[in-house]
Amino acid sequence: MTNESHIRVANPPPKSLMIWDGECHFCKRWIERWREITAGAVDYVTYQEAAERYPEIPVEQFKRAVALIEPDGKIFFAAEAVYRSLRCRSSRKWLSRSYDRVPGFAAISELGYKFIAHHRKLGSTVTRLLWGTDVRPPTYFWSRRWFLRTLGVIYLIAFVSLWVQVDGLIGSNGISPVNQFLPAVHEQLGGRAYSLLPTLCWFNSSNAFLHFLCGGGAVSSLLLIAGFVPVLSLIALFVFYLSLTIAGQTFLSFQWDILLLETGFLAIFLAPWQIWPKRGREPPVSRTALFLLKLLLFKLMVMSGVVKLTSGDDSWGWLNHSFHWSALTALDYHYWSQPLPTVFGWWADKSPEWFKHFSVAFCLAVEIIAPFFIWSPRRPRLIAAGLIVFLQIAIAVTGNYCFFNLMTIVLCLLLIDDAAIGRKYATVINRCYSYRLSTYGAIAVIVVTLPINAWLIFTVFKPDAPWPRPLAAAYRRVEAFRIVNGYGLFRVMTKDRAEIVIEGSADGIDWLPYEFKWKPGDVKRAPGWCAPHQPRLDWQMWFAALGTPQQNPWFGGLTIRLLQGSADVNRLLAHNPFPDKPPRYIRARFYRYRFTTTEEHRRSGAWWKRQELGEYLPTVSLDQFR
């Protein structure tokens, strides 16, 4: 570092002036970025235009480094000039202070600047590779607009999908009636029940109110899609869906339900506080809220990937603390053992072994490595987004995961800045009151949730690590609201497939099976495609097959409703073999299901083959439940 900063010019400019080399393409790109960052507080001119005005500065000095001339005539060069030009932005004043006060910071900065100045062609190449032709600070008006609209679409899907099932699942004549569940919880927990189970259903748990919540959510979703009062719409959506999630008990305990709630909550701080935002009149995007949503995507992907390697399941390629290509066998089981495969899953199961192994490795790479590029410059960030989207599409094609894949893709929209799609928006300098309100709210959320999120991510690397007491206490307080969650699908690959076939009988001799709409039953029925709709009873039947009736209390409720002939529950099924009078007896049989081979399918037309394993639920009658 030199002492040239003590030089003064005789005719200082009225405001800070940055002088740079107009023949340097690298400088030209980065000066455009600095011009937007300093937002009118600094003027910019090439030395080719300004050198004659400031004879105190040698032309060779201009060629070596940028110069900053202050209104008091002081001159600063190289890294010091860059840092001082940023003092007009409160968020970047620390750079100039560090240069002046932190030992070694100035020396390292000048050394780095000197290296770049001597390798401008290399710097220009790296810039093009990482940023493209536009290195200005990215704006996210387009991505915010379409993120909020598509989030509204997902909310609409979630509410309507639940609406057509809610009576049969948790209605008064459903499998797990919420009007019985909440009073039982209150009797056990007393006043604590309200904070542990935050739901509007405490006020009313009738079927009509459940329909009101679903309908209100659908209307609020449409308002969000239209862009009308987005913040109020998001608040209503969060409250309604949280209420239904709590009321839904085990039927709304899936990772996409909590992902939707966490995303919807954070989106409140991203949305513009306007009645009807118009293009070109929108407040700036809160960088703090954007950070929170990007962190959510990062957490979702990294946790989903790392948890597979730390689970101890060797089908994910991790054997004896090292990675083995030959052990990447997860997809040997996944296509036919997943809850609701599609017909494309049947075909994918027939792919060569090497391709399945490659697909497992690709999945792990995308989930574990790609998320780190979320924080990188534009081009690697876009590549990461593309890889994540591709993986989600591949998963969605072979299996029904309702709106989970869509939710992940929608989060990836926030990685696309306006310059990436050729949109140009002027930097908004006026930070309006609503922008500050959103930012302060997002900062409060960061203070509360960032330590919890950091520990959640840490726990997938160290599953046995005990939670620090203060952190565990904070997590318990916010956990009920689903605003900060852990993720990790298919931690351990299911390597068998047992299916429950429920049968009814009028006399205990002749038995007729109940056919579900989507889960495997009739071996000749092709696997269907129901996503983004989620048949929640079909999904729970998959989990029930992993345990016993005693471990799934709702299964007893299903049995009772079938014996009673509940119309609400029967509407959840594809076929009721007792349309006129409910059966006198119910039983459940256990079967092992596998996809047929190509030859078996060609010969018999069956998509599945099955082997009876025995009894899941012994014969019961309604008298036994009284």
Image (tube, rainbow, N blue to C red):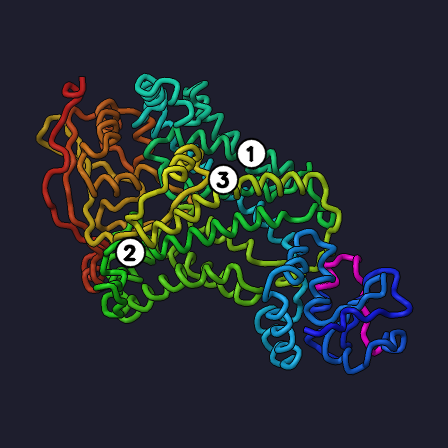
Q: Earlier in the sequence, mark 1 or mark 2?
A: 1
Mark 2 and mark 3: span between their CA atoms?
Answer: 27 Å
* SS state under label 1: helix
Expressed as whole percent of the image width and height from the top left, the position of residue 297 reads 47, 52
- In magenta stretch: residue 37: yes
Q: Is residue 516 left or right of residue 149?
A: left
Determine whether 412 is above or below 154 in the image: below
What type is the residue that disc 1 sits on?
A: Ile
According to the image, label 1 marks what residue?
Answer: 235
Q: Can you tell which mark lies on residue 448?
A: 3
Which of the 4 image quadrants contains residue 559?
Answer: top left
Contact (Cβ within 8 Å) of mark 1 with mark 2: no
Density class for disc 1 (Cα within 10 Å; few <14, some 14-19, many ≥20) is some
Q: Is residue 520 left or right of residue 273?
A: left
Residue at the image position 23 percent from the left and 56 percent from the top: 312
Residue at the image position 15 percent from the left and 45 percent from the top: 591
- In magenta stretch: residue 204: no
Report the mark closest to the observer, 1 or 2: 2
Residue at the image position 38 percent from the left and 23 percent from the top: 193
Q: Is residue 539 left or right of residue 533?
A: left
Mark 1 and mark 2: span between their CA atoms?
Answer: 37 Å
According to the image, label 2 marks what residue?
Answer: 310
What are the residue bounds of the magenta stretch?
34-48
Report the mark closest to the observer, 2 or 3: 3
* SS state under label 3: helix
Looking at the rendering, in which quadrant would you find the C terminus? Answer: top left
Expressed as whole percent of the image width and height from the top left, the position of residue 459 reads 35, 49
